[in-house]
C-alpha cells in the first residue's frame, strides 16, 4: 500500500507550497461542538491494536462513526487498555457483543477485521473531565437505525 509516508513517497519529497495561500487564509476557530452525553448509534469504522502512550500496555483503539441523523459522520473514540482482571473481562464482553468470540486473547490481532462495520448502540458518559464510551448492544443488520442522540426520537436525553 503506497501512501504519503511509505518508502515510495518519503515525506521529504512532498511539496505543499501550492497550499500556502489557502493555509494562510484558513480560519483558526472551528467552533467545535462537544458531543453531549447520551445514546448514539454508531458503526465501527476502524479498530487497531496499539500501545497506550502513558503505560506502554497493549490497547484496543476503536474509531466509531455516528450514523445520525444528529451528529452524523462525527467520530467517537474508545480506548480499551488490555490488562488482567476486570479490564480483560470487560473487553471480552465487548468483543462478544460485537460478535467476536475468541478462545484466546492472542487471537485478537488476526480477527480485528471481523469488528469492522459492526453497528452498535453506545452511551457516552462524562464524569468530571473524562468521557467514556460504553457499548450497550449490537444493532442487527436488518434493524433500522433511527439515528443517534436526536432530540426526541425515543432515546434518553438525560445525562447519566
Image (cartoon, rainbow, N blue to C red):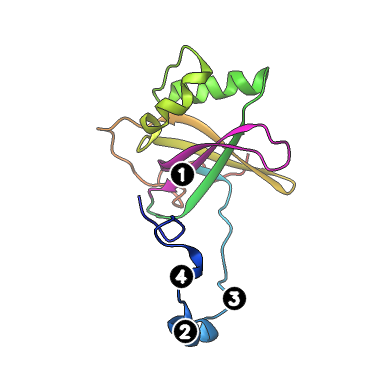
Q: Are marks 2 and 4 in contact (CB under 8 Å)?
A: no
What is the crowding at mark 4: few (fewer than 14 residues within 10 Å), some, or many (at least 20)? few
Q: Are marks 4 and 1 in contact (CB under 8 Å)?
A: no
Q: Residue at x 45, y 71 (%)?
A: 14
Q: Residue at x 42, y 35 (%)?
A: 120
Secondary structure that dominates the magenta span = strand
Q: Which residue is mark 4?
A: 13
In which quarter of the view is residue 44 placed?
top left
Q: Which residue is mark 1?
A: 64
- Tag 4 or tag 2, which sits nearer the N-term? 4
Q: Which mark is residue 22?
A: 2
Q: Which mark is residue 29?
A: 3
- Tag 1 or tag 3, which sits nearer the N-term? 3
Question: Which secondary structure, mark 3?
Answer: loop
Q: CA distance from mark 4 to mark 3?
A: 30 Å
Q: Work out whether residue 110 or residue 39 is closer to the camera in this orientation and state it.
A: 110
Q: Position of residue 25 (x, y in %)?
A: 52, 86
Q: Nearer the viewer, mark 2 or mark 4?
A: 4
Q: Residue at x 56, y 24 (%)?
A: 91
Q: Are marks 2 and 3 in contact (CB under 8 Å)?
A: no
Q: Is residue 13 left or right of residue 2?
A: right
Q: CA distance from mark 4 to mark 1?
A: 33 Å
What number of labels is visible?
4
- Tag 1 or tag 4, which sits nearer the N-term? 4
Q: Are marks 2 and 1 in contact (CB under 8 Å)?
A: no
Q: Which residues are magenta?
A: 40-67
Q: CA distance from mark 3 to mark 1?
A: 25 Å
- Tag 1 or tag 2, which sits nearer the N-term? 2
Q: Are marks 3 and 1 in contact (CB under 8 Å)?
A: no
Question: Which secondary structure, mark 2?
Answer: helix
Amino acid at each position: 500500500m503506497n501512501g504519503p509516508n511509505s518508502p515510495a513517497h518519503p515525506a521529504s519529497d512532498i511539496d505543499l507550497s501550492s497550499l500556502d495561500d489557502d493555509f494562510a487564509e484558513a480560519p483558526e476557530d472551528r467552533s467545535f461542538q462537544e458531543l453531549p452525553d447520551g445514546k448514539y448509534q454508531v458503526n465501527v469504522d476502524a479498530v487497531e491494536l496499539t500501545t497506550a502512550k502513558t503505560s506502554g500496555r497493549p490497547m484496543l483503539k476503536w474509531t466509531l462513526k455516528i450514523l445520525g441523523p444528529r451528529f452524523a459522520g462525527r467520530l467517537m473514540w474508545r480506548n480499551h487498555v488490555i490488562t488482567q482482571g476486570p479490564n480483560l473481562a470487560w473487553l471480552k464482553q465487548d468483543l462478544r457483543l460485537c460478535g467476536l468470540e475468541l478462545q484466546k486473547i492472542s487471537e485478537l490481532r488476526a480477527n480485528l477485521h471481523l469488528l469492522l462495520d459492526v453497528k452498535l448502540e453506545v452511551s457516552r458518559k462524562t464524569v468530571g473531565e473524562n468521557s467514556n464510551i460504553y457499548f450497550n448492544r449490537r444493532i442487527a443488520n436488518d434493524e433500522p437505525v433511527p439515528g443517534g442522540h436526536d432530540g426526541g426520537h425515543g432515546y434518553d436525553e438525560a445525562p447519566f
